[in-house]
Image (cartoon, helix red, strand yellow):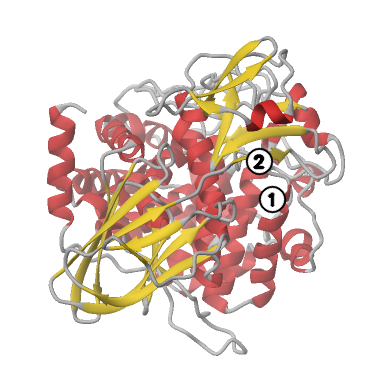
Amino acid sequence: MCKTRRDFLKSSAALAAGMAVLRNTLPAMDAGKSGPAQTKLSQFEYGEVQLLDGPMLEQFHNNVSLFLSLPDDDLLKPFRQFAGLPAPGEDMGGWYSPSSDFDPPKNMTGYIPGHSFGQYLSGLARAYAITGDKATQAKVHGLVKAFAPTVTTKFYEGYCIPAYTFDKSNCGLIDAHQFAGDPKALAVLNKATDAALPWLPEKALSRDEMMARPHKNISFTWDETYTLPENFYLGYQRGAGDRYRQLAKRFLQDDSYFGPLSENRNVLPGQHAYSHVNALSSAMQAYLTDGSEMHLRAAKNGFRFVLEQSYATGGWGPQEGFTKPVTDELVNSLHSTHASFETPCGAYGHFKIVRYLMRVTGESTHGDSTEAVLYNTILGARPIRRDGVSFYYSDYNMNGQKADYGDKWPCCSGTFPQLTADYGISSYFRSPRGVYVNLFVPSRVTWKQGGAQVSLTQHTSYPNSNETSLQLKLDRPEKFLIALRVPAWAGASTAVRVNGKVANATVRPGSWAEIERDWKDGDRIEFSLDMPLRLMPIDPQHQNTVALLHGPVALFALEPGTKVLTRAQLMAAQRAGSESSDWEVASGAGKVRLKPFPAITSEHYRLYHEV
């Protein structure tokens, strides 16, 4: 890490101290009444969690640095062009800039001008809440101020997917208000809402319903009105006004999506994968804001259906679609496509719905899926380049290879900075009893517990190592709970020690190891996870198509799908070295090297084996 980067991080951590950002939690209310629902856990504020040196912090810093460096005039150019205003700056190209070459699906250049502006704004606002960096706050405020004069209903005239882009603008503006303290953001949001509403349908429409309407070309059938409620509800909660609550209710897709899901009917097959996982967060907001048990059931069932057709990596949605259960569709995708998982977008949606579900249910096993997606998908994503070239799909083909996306500034360039800003708040949760450690990552969480100011620092190289140490700093002794997530796959020798002695805690896979005691400054927890090798079939009906995992990490064989490996050979895999993340499997044709996804660069590989 270069000196300038380290200086940035140190100054950011210092500035973050004492920041108070309103936590997105709601008061308890009688479940039988319409109103805000009670949660078992709550999120920490962005500024209360600091990532420490490691790959997650590296990704966060790369994204903040990139979007801080992009000229405001370039980001605002499409909006100024459509408003008929002077539009200095350079065209960003790809999906982001208007182009007469747009001819879907053959040529996606000029697809949705300005679509990801709100996501870039959101990512920077969240970054400010984490770091307290004044240059980041100034960037957010400057973009909101300059965006305001461009807002006009004319922007959406002839625009193929208005709800899609407005939803992102909505998210960016409410985040600018909430996390960067922008005094104009909600006023601009109201103006932007007025501009978009004439172009939105009366209710959320499925893609089939969009297809049945008259449309200029196929892209006009791709709008995602069913994702709007989450940010409408959040706008309402953050002070934008009651009309946002009413708009949220208007666009809940109850007839063809949430209603059937709440009745445990799997309507995912054939749906666009990321946007329908993203829509589950709207169902959760309907529960959190209005106490709707139907929408909670829909979100729980929908996410379970997603997990039931996920790959061993935690990724899902080959060719951006969900497959039919109890068919060959998922296993056939290993041969038919290299577009296996829409990675930054899918990971962003996955992290969000898991946070909602963990807050409501308190169940640790939801965190297992976050961990899988983290280590097997998004941490292996290539950085967004300065010219907008981005990583989009993870490839699980039997002859897979990493590749960047062909068009600049795609959707995944917008969710990536939002996701990396959310790494910290996905790592810990809290309750009145104490803190819940969800992810074992180099980080520090700071909070007030009773009368004590507490910080908990994790030192770990997990999952390359099975050991994590957690160091406490308190300004006075205090009794509270520290709960550690014990993954469902954890082996029998998993153990927790406090100050060198076996902890008084039940360590059971698929639950929380709860340690409640009087803590004092300098106390130390040692968490040793038994990380067995295991074989995971792609689905229940194809038990002989398996991936090899070590703990949470899926291991990819570095060669095309030619060498046949047996179950016994895979389960006898050995580390390539004591400090290495690589593994080796001995076969009759020689050794096969296996790597975790983040360690793969340009090699050909396969995830699954026919045994």
Rendered image: mark on residue 316: 2
Q: Amino acid at mark 2?
A: Trp
State the image coordinates of residue 372 (x, y, percent, origin top left).
54, 44
State the image coordinates of residue 18 (x, y, percent, origin top left).
16, 64
Position of 344 relative to 87 (above/below) = below
- What is the C-alpha distance between the residues marked 2 and 1? 7 Å
The answer to whether residue 7 is left or right of residue 67 is left
The answer to whether residue 574 is left or right of residue 468 is right
Q: Few, some or many C-alpha atoms within 10 Å of disc 1 (few <14, some 14-19, many ≥20)? A: many
Residue 387 visible: yes
Q: Nearer the viewer, residue 257 or 391?
A: 391
Q: Few, some or many C-alpha atoms within 10 Å of disc 2 (few <14, some 14-19, many ≥20)? A: many
Say whether disc 2 or disc 1 marks the residue closer to the N-terminus: 1
Q: Residue at x 43, y 71 (%)?
A: 505
Position of 29 relative to 284 (above/below) = below
- Which residue lies most toward the top here? 589
Rendered image: mark on residue 306: 1
State the image coordinates of residue 9 (x, y, percent, origin top left).
18, 41
Q: Residue at x 62, y 18 (%)?
A: 586
- Which residue lies most toward the right here? 327
Q: Amino acid at mark 1?
A: Val
Q: Nearer the viewer, residue 472 or 40?
A: 472
Q: Nearer the viewer, residue 479 or 263?
A: 479
| Label 2 element class | loop
Q: Nearer the viewer, residue 24 or 152?
A: 24
Q: Do tag 2 and tag 1 residues touch (Cβ < 8 Å)?
A: yes
State the image coordinates of residue 426 (x, y, percent, origin top left).
42, 55
Position of 581 relative to 538 (above/below) = above
Q: Residue at x 35, y 50 (%)?
A: 468
